[in-house]
Image (tube, rainbow, N blue to C red):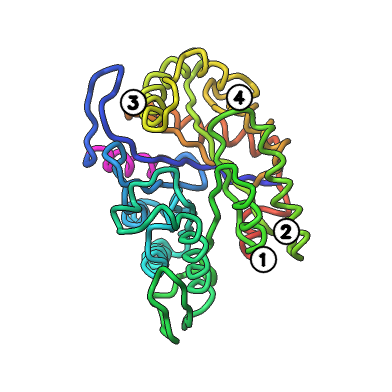
Amino acid sequence: MTMEIGMCTFAEVGTDPVTGQVTTAAQRLRDVMAEVSLVEQVGLDVYAIGEHHRPDFAVSAPAVVLAAAAERTSRIRLTSAVTVLSSDDPVRVFQEFATLDLISSGRAEIMAGRGSFTESFPLFGLSLNDYDELFAEKLDLLLTLRDNERVTWSGRHRAALDDLAVYPRPFQASLPIWLAVGGTPQSVVRAATLGLPLSLAIIGGAPERFVSLIDLYRDTARRVGRDPAALPVGINSHTYIADTSQRARDEFFPGYAAAMTRIGRERGWPPTTRGQFEVLCSPRGALLVGSPQEVIDKILFEHELFAHQRFLAQLTVGTMAHAKTMHAIELLGTVVAPAVRQALGPGLSSPRQARGRL
């Protein structure tokens, strides 16, 4: 079975805890353009960009950044990770990504999710009391827009559409929409019921504890009459690769700990310690941080668990020197990805083939 392998970034900005150097939003976006060019150059398959509305991240409009990336690439898939659909207008989301799809000649995707932060809700005048209903309603509209040129639709949180056409239409016959989840069974069931590819973020704990969610996804698909083989699964994980295991951990930990401690402080979590980090880096931990061989082994171990068709490495968690990130991308593309592909071998159910059956 083939696997697409790519990179995800949240485009972090701020102060490098090691060097004290400050990365501005302007500089970080220039770095992102260099990253995406290298991702294609070293043979990776996907570049994904998150959406945030906070001072520690540079991207609030992923479609805009991905459009710039489209002009620097010709082959790789370009996707959000995630589009915070609950606080956006599905008509504009569809138009933006249809435009991206035209610019990129059919390489755009949407990864829709509820997001792990809430700043966008008050920013756009929405109530967190409607958190679940907003997402369900807006996802329904987005899928309706994807599947129909003219739309009649009504809901509680947006003005109705009465036989209105939405343009432009994308380059692809059906714009791929993945559903991003973090571990909620109801979200997994929703993805399977709607026939949407599933993207699962594993950022803590042991990967084995997520097997039941993937089983639930595929079992639900069968129960509602869908073929699980036609529904790709993607795994997103915090990842960092250096020439040696010790170097990878030493380089990644300061920025990772600073970012996770800062976010944890907002949520009442204790500071991230080196001991906790080392446990997460162990062979059965959630972090893919180490030498190329360690990361290869962990990707293959997780493939035994999930039989997934896509792996996205979130190579930037916290601020660190751009040159180190670029070296990690190079190792991911030139060492890790070829070894994983060779180990898995060619298959009859690649994500691209599966998308064609959706």
Amino acid type for the residue under numbered disc 3: Met
Image coordinates for residue 59, horizontal then vertical, percent: 31, 46
Amino acid type for the residue under numbered disc 4: Gly
Q: Which of disc 3 and disc 2 is earlier in sequence? A: 2
Query: Is mark 3 in CB contact (under 8 Å) with mark 4?
Result: no
Q: Secondary structure at mark 1?
A: helix
228 and 349: which is toward the camera? 228
Image coordinates for residue 155, horizontal then vertical, percent: 46, 73
Q: Which of disc 4 and disc 2 is earlier in sequence? A: 2
Amino acid type for the residue under numbered disc 2: Ala
Q: Is residue 346 magenta?
A: no
Residue position for label 3 = 320
Residue drawn at point x = 53 percent, y = 50 percent: 180
Query: Is mark 2 in CB contact (under 8 Å) with mark 4?
Result: no
352 and 114: which is toward the camera? 114
Q: In the image, 29: left or right of 4?
A: left
Query: Is mark 4 in CB contact (under 8 Å) with mark 1?
Result: no
The mark found on residue 285 in the picture is 4
Image coordinates for residue 126, horizontal then vertical, percent: 35, 58
Q: Secondary structure at mark 4?
A: loop
Location of residue 36 by image quarter: top left
Dominant SS in magenta: helix
Dot 3, crowdedness within 10 Å: few (<14), some or many (≥20)?
Answer: many
**Closer to the eye: label 2 or 1:** 2
Q: Is residue 175 above or below residue 197?
A: below
**Closer to the eye: label 4 or 1:** 4
Structural distance between the alpha carbons of marks 4 and 1: 34 Å
Q: Is residue 311 visible?
A: no
Structural distance between the alpha carbons of marks 2 and 1: 14 Å
Please report the bounds of the magenta region as a residue range.
27-38
Q: Going by the picture, which residue comes out furthest to the front?
A: 129
Structural distance between the alpha carbons of marks 2 and 3: 41 Å
